[in-house]
Protein backbone atom coordinates (compact mmCIF):
# COMPACT_ATOMS: atom_id res chain seq x y z
CA UNK A 1 0.00 0.00 0.00
CA UNK A 2 2.83 2.38 0.96
CA UNK A 3 4.57 1.84 -2.36
CA UNK A 4 1.34 2.14 -4.38
CA UNK A 5 0.82 5.58 -2.78
CA UNK A 6 4.47 6.59 -3.37
CA UNK A 7 4.03 5.61 -7.03
CA UNK A 8 0.75 7.54 -7.27
CA UNK A 9 2.34 10.68 -5.76
CA UNK A 10 5.32 10.49 -8.13
CA UNK A 11 3.25 9.75 -11.29
CA UNK A 12 0.55 12.33 -10.56
CA UNK A 13 3.08 15.06 -9.69
CA UNK A 14 5.09 14.31 -12.84
CA UNK A 15 1.99 14.41 -15.07
CA UNK A 16 0.86 17.59 -13.30
CA UNK A 17 4.19 19.40 -13.68
CA UNK A 18 4.81 18.40 -17.30
CA UNK A 19 1.27 19.31 -18.42
CA UNK A 20 1.41 22.58 -16.51
CA UNK A 21 4.68 23.40 -18.25
CA UNK A 22 3.16 22.52 -21.66
CA UNK A 23 0.05 24.57 -20.89
CA UNK A 24 1.98 27.63 -19.72
CA UNK A 25 4.23 27.48 -22.79
CA UNK A 26 1.16 27.31 -25.01
CA UNK A 27 -0.02 30.46 -23.26
CA UNK A 28 3.38 32.11 -23.66
CA UNK A 29 5.57 34.16 -21.37
CA UNK A 30 3.71 36.51 -19.01
CA UNK A 31 5.04 40.06 -19.48
CA UNK A 32 2.28 42.27 -18.12
CA UNK A 33 2.02 42.19 -14.33
CA UNK A 34 -0.75 44.78 -13.88
CA UNK A 35 -3.68 43.30 -11.89
CA UNK A 36 -6.11 43.45 -14.86
CA UNK A 37 -3.64 41.75 -17.20
CA UNK A 38 -2.86 39.07 -14.60
CA UNK A 39 -6.62 38.47 -14.24
CA UNK A 40 -7.16 38.00 -17.98
CA UNK A 41 -4.04 35.79 -18.23
CA UNK A 42 -5.39 33.65 -15.36
CA UNK A 43 -8.73 33.41 -17.19
CA UNK A 44 -7.04 32.17 -20.36
CA UNK A 45 -4.80 29.76 -18.45
CA UNK A 46 -7.81 28.33 -16.55
CA UNK A 47 -9.42 27.39 -19.89
CA UNK A 48 -6.26 25.67 -21.17
CA UNK A 49 -6.82 21.90 -21.48
CA UNK A 50 -3.31 21.00 -20.30
CA UNK A 51 -3.67 23.21 -17.23
CA UNK A 52 -7.07 21.68 -16.34
CA UNK A 53 -5.71 18.10 -16.51
CA UNK A 54 -2.59 19.26 -14.64
CA UNK A 55 -4.71 20.67 -11.81
CA UNK A 56 -6.64 17.37 -11.52
CA UNK A 57 -3.32 15.47 -11.43
CA UNK A 58 -2.06 17.79 -8.66
CA UNK A 59 -5.22 17.06 -6.65
CA UNK A 60 -4.64 13.29 -7.05
CA UNK A 61 -1.02 13.84 -5.99
CA UNK A 62 -2.01 15.80 -2.88
CA UNK A 63 -4.68 13.35 -1.69
CA UNK A 64 -2.31 10.40 -2.28
CA UNK A 65 0.32 12.24 -0.21
CA UNK A 66 -2.27 12.85 2.55
CA UNK A 67 -3.06 9.13 2.62
CA UNK A 68 0.66 8.27 2.51
CA UNK A 69 1.52 10.29 5.66
CA UNK A 70 -1.29 8.53 7.51
CA UNK A 71 0.49 5.17 7.09
CA UNK A 72 4.18 6.09 6.59
CA UNK A 73 6.60 8.31 8.58
CA UNK A 74 6.95 11.92 7.43
CA UNK A 75 10.75 11.49 7.25
CA UNK A 76 10.05 8.83 4.59
CA UNK A 77 7.16 10.45 2.67
CA UNK A 78 8.59 13.96 2.19
CA UNK A 79 12.08 13.13 0.83
CA UNK A 80 10.56 10.25 -1.19
CA UNK A 81 8.43 12.77 -3.08
CA UNK A 82 11.71 14.28 -4.39
CA UNK A 83 11.89 11.20 -6.65
CA UNK A 84 9.63 13.17 -9.03
CA UNK A 85 12.82 14.92 -10.20
CA UNK A 86 13.88 11.69 -11.90
CA UNK A 87 10.94 11.15 -14.33
CA UNK A 88 10.49 14.92 -14.66
CA UNK A 89 14.06 15.43 -15.86
CA UNK A 90 13.69 12.55 -18.34
CA UNK A 91 10.39 13.96 -19.65
CA UNK A 92 11.77 17.52 -19.74
CA UNK A 93 14.52 16.21 -22.02
CA UNK A 94 12.28 14.05 -24.25
CA UNK A 95 8.87 15.75 -24.27
CA UNK A 96 9.65 19.41 -23.55
CA UNK A 97 12.95 19.25 -25.52
CA UNK A 98 14.82 21.00 -22.72
CA UNK A 99 18.57 20.90 -22.72
CA UNK A 100 19.65 19.03 -19.56
CA UNK A 101 23.28 19.63 -18.64
CA UNK A 102 25.56 17.27 -16.70
CA UNK A 103 25.00 18.99 -13.36
CA UNK A 104 21.29 18.34 -13.57
CA UNK A 105 21.88 14.67 -14.48
CA UNK A 106 24.36 14.43 -11.57
CA UNK A 107 21.74 15.95 -9.26
CA UNK A 108 19.13 13.45 -10.48
CA UNK A 109 21.59 10.59 -9.88
CA UNK A 110 22.21 11.79 -6.28
CA UNK A 111 18.43 11.98 -5.69
CA UNK A 112 18.08 8.44 -7.08
CA UNK A 113 20.75 7.05 -4.71
CA UNK A 114 19.27 9.09 -1.83
CA UNK A 115 15.80 7.69 -2.48
CA UNK A 116 17.21 4.14 -2.36
CA UNK A 117 18.75 4.91 1.07
CA UNK A 118 15.49 6.44 2.36
CA UNK A 119 13.52 3.37 1.27
CA UNK A 120 15.69 1.10 3.47
CA UNK B 1 10.21 44.85 -17.95
CA UNK B 2 7.84 45.47 -15.07
CA UNK B 3 9.72 42.97 -12.94
CA UNK B 4 13.06 44.68 -13.52
CA UNK B 5 11.72 48.07 -12.59
CA UNK B 6 10.31 46.67 -9.34
CA UNK B 7 13.70 45.21 -8.45
CA UNK B 8 15.55 48.40 -9.38
CA UNK B 9 13.26 50.53 -7.25
CA UNK B 10 14.39 48.66 -4.13
CA UNK B 11 17.73 49.08 -2.39
CA UNK B 12 19.82 45.86 -2.67
CA UNK B 13 19.91 45.48 1.13
CA UNK B 14 16.10 45.60 1.28
CA UNK B 15 15.78 43.03 -1.46
CA UNK B 16 18.26 40.75 0.28
CA UNK B 17 16.40 41.04 3.57
CA UNK B 18 13.09 40.33 1.82
CA UNK B 19 14.59 37.32 0.02
CA UNK B 20 15.96 35.87 3.29
CA UNK B 21 12.64 36.44 5.06
CA UNK B 22 10.71 34.64 2.29
CA UNK B 23 13.28 31.82 2.17
CA UNK B 24 12.79 31.21 5.91
CA UNK B 25 8.99 31.48 5.53
CA UNK B 26 9.07 29.01 2.63
CA UNK B 27 10.98 26.39 4.65
CA UNK B 28 9.01 26.88 7.88
CA UNK B 29 5.56 26.86 6.25
CA UNK B 30 6.43 23.69 4.31
CA UNK B 31 7.83 21.81 7.32
CA UNK B 32 5.08 22.98 9.70
CA UNK B 33 2.39 22.24 7.08
CA UNK B 34 3.63 18.69 6.51
CA UNK B 35 4.01 18.12 10.27
CA UNK B 36 0.43 19.21 11.04
CA UNK B 37 -0.88 17.21 8.06
CA UNK B 38 0.97 14.07 9.20
CA UNK B 39 -0.11 14.47 12.85
CA UNK B 40 -3.73 15.01 11.80
CA UNK B 41 -3.80 12.07 9.40
CA UNK B 42 -2.22 9.82 12.05
CA UNK B 43 -4.89 10.87 14.55
CA UNK B 44 -7.63 10.04 12.05
CA UNK B 45 -6.13 6.56 11.67
CA UNK B 46 -7.59 4.18 9.11
CA UNK B 47 -9.96 6.33 7.09
CA UNK B 48 -10.08 4.10 4.03
CA UNK B 49 -9.13 4.98 0.50
CA UNK B 50 -12.27 6.61 -0.89
CA UNK B 51 -11.82 10.14 -2.23
CA UNK B 52 -14.79 11.26 -0.10
CA UNK B 53 -13.10 10.05 3.10
CA UNK B 54 -9.95 11.97 2.13
CA UNK B 55 -11.95 15.13 1.40
CA UNK B 56 -13.69 14.66 4.76
CA UNK B 57 -10.26 14.45 6.43
CA UNK B 58 -9.65 18.06 5.35
CA UNK B 59 -12.09 19.12 8.09
CA UNK B 60 -9.98 17.60 10.87
CA UNK B 61 -8.50 20.65 12.69
CA UNK B 62 -4.84 19.57 12.47
CA UNK B 63 -5.20 18.56 8.79
CA UNK B 64 -6.91 21.90 8.06
CA UNK B 65 -4.06 23.83 9.75
CA UNK B 66 -1.57 21.72 7.74
CA UNK B 67 -3.35 22.44 4.45
CA UNK B 68 -3.57 26.18 5.29
CA UNK B 69 0.19 26.24 5.99
CA UNK B 70 0.87 24.38 2.72
CA UNK B 71 -1.17 27.05 0.88
CA UNK B 72 1.01 29.70 2.60
CA UNK B 73 4.04 27.68 1.45
CA UNK B 74 2.83 27.61 -2.18
CA UNK B 75 2.26 31.37 -2.14
CA UNK B 76 5.59 32.29 -0.49
CA UNK B 77 7.43 29.86 -2.80
CA UNK B 78 5.78 31.40 -5.88
CA UNK B 79 6.48 34.92 -4.59
CA UNK B 80 10.14 34.04 -3.96
CA UNK B 81 10.44 32.57 -7.47
CA UNK B 82 9.06 35.79 -8.95
CA UNK B 83 12.22 37.75 -8.04
CA UNK B 84 14.89 35.30 -6.84
CA UNK B 85 16.90 32.97 -9.09
CA UNK B 86 15.80 29.35 -9.29
CA UNK B 87 19.41 28.40 -8.46
CA UNK B 88 18.88 30.21 -5.14
CA UNK B 89 15.37 28.88 -4.49
CA UNK B 90 16.16 25.19 -5.19
CA UNK B 91 18.79 24.80 -2.42
CA UNK B 92 16.39 26.63 -0.09
CA UNK B 93 13.71 24.07 -0.99
CA UNK B 94 16.26 21.28 -0.58
CA UNK B 95 17.17 22.46 2.94
CA UNK B 96 13.52 21.80 3.76
CA UNK B 97 14.17 18.03 3.56
CA UNK B 98 16.76 18.22 6.35
CA UNK B 99 14.53 20.46 8.52
CA UNK B 100 11.63 18.02 7.85
CA UNK B 101 13.71 15.12 9.22
CA UNK B 102 14.46 17.10 12.41
CA UNK B 103 10.79 18.04 12.76
CA UNK B 104 9.80 14.38 12.30
CA UNK B 105 12.26 13.43 15.03
CA UNK B 106 11.29 16.21 17.48
CA UNK B 107 7.54 16.76 16.93
CA UNK B 108 6.36 13.38 15.66
CA UNK B 109 8.80 11.18 17.62
CA UNK B 110 9.92 9.37 14.46
CA UNK B 111 13.11 7.33 14.64
CA UNK B 112 15.23 8.47 11.69
CA UNK B 113 17.73 5.71 10.89
CA UNK B 114 21.32 6.47 9.77
CA UNK B 115 20.40 5.09 6.30
CA UNK B 116 17.50 7.54 6.05
CA UNK B 117 19.70 10.46 7.18
CA UNK B 118 22.19 9.48 4.46
CA UNK B 119 19.37 9.42 1.92
CA UNK B 120 18.05 12.81 3.03
CA UNK B 121 21.53 14.37 2.72
CA UNK B 122 21.93 12.85 -0.78
CA UNK B 123 18.48 14.12 -1.88
CA UNK B 124 19.33 17.59 -0.52
CA UNK B 125 22.63 17.61 -2.42
CA UNK B 126 20.86 16.35 -5.56
CA UNK B 127 18.12 18.98 -5.49
CA UNK B 128 20.77 21.68 -4.89
CA UNK B 129 22.72 20.46 -7.92
CA UNK B 130 19.59 20.36 -10.12
CA UNK B 131 19.05 24.02 -9.19
CA UNK B 132 22.56 25.08 -10.20
CA UNK B 133 21.76 25.10 -13.90
CA UNK B 134 20.38 27.73 -16.26
CA UNK B 135 16.61 28.14 -15.97
CA UNK B 136 15.66 28.54 -19.63
CA UNK B 137 17.39 26.18 -22.03
CA UNK B 138 14.51 24.88 -24.18
CA UNK B 139 15.04 25.33 -27.87
CA UNK B 140 18.76 25.99 -27.58
CA UNK B 141 21.14 23.83 -29.54
CA UNK B 142 22.35 20.68 -27.83
Image (cartoon, rainbow, N blue to C red):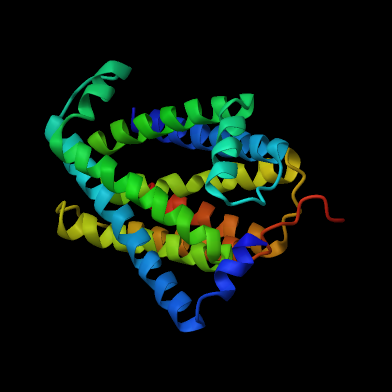
Q: Please determine whether, in this image, residue A7 is positioned above or below residue A38.
A: above
Residue B16 in the figure: left or right of residue A36: left
Query: Looking at the image, which residue is at 44% across and 60% down?
Result: B93
Q: Position of residue B132 (x, y in %)?
A: 61, 67
Q: Is residue A8 visible?
A: yes
Q: Please determine whether, in this image, residue B51 is positioned above or below residue A99.
A: above
Residue B92 in the figure: left or right of residue A45: left
Q: Position of residue A67 (x, y in %)?
A: 29, 31
Query: Looking at the image, which residue is at 45% across and 51% down?
Result: A115
| Quarter of the image where one finds residue B55 | top left
Picture quarter with the N terminus of chain A: top left
Q: Position of residue B123 (x, y in %)?
A: 46, 59
Q: Please determine whether, in this image, residue B45 is positioned above or below residue A104.
A: above
- The mark total stands at 0
Q: Please determine whether, in this image, residue B59 is positioned above or below residue B76.
A: above
Q: Position of residue B51 (x, y in %)?
A: 32, 18
| Quarter of the image where one finds residue B53 | top left
Query: Looking at the image, which residue is at 50% across and 46% down?
Result: A83
Query: Looking at the image, which residue is at 56% across and 29% down?
Result: A46
Q: Is residue B50 visible?
A: no
Amino acid sequence: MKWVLVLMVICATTVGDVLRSLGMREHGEIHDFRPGAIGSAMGMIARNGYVIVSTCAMAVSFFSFMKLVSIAPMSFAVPMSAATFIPETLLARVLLKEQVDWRRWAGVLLILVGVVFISQ
Amino acid sequence: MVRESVVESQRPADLQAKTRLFAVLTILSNVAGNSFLTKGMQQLGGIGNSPLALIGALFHPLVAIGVALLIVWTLTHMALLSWADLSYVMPVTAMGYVVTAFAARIFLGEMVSPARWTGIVLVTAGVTLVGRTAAATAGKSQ
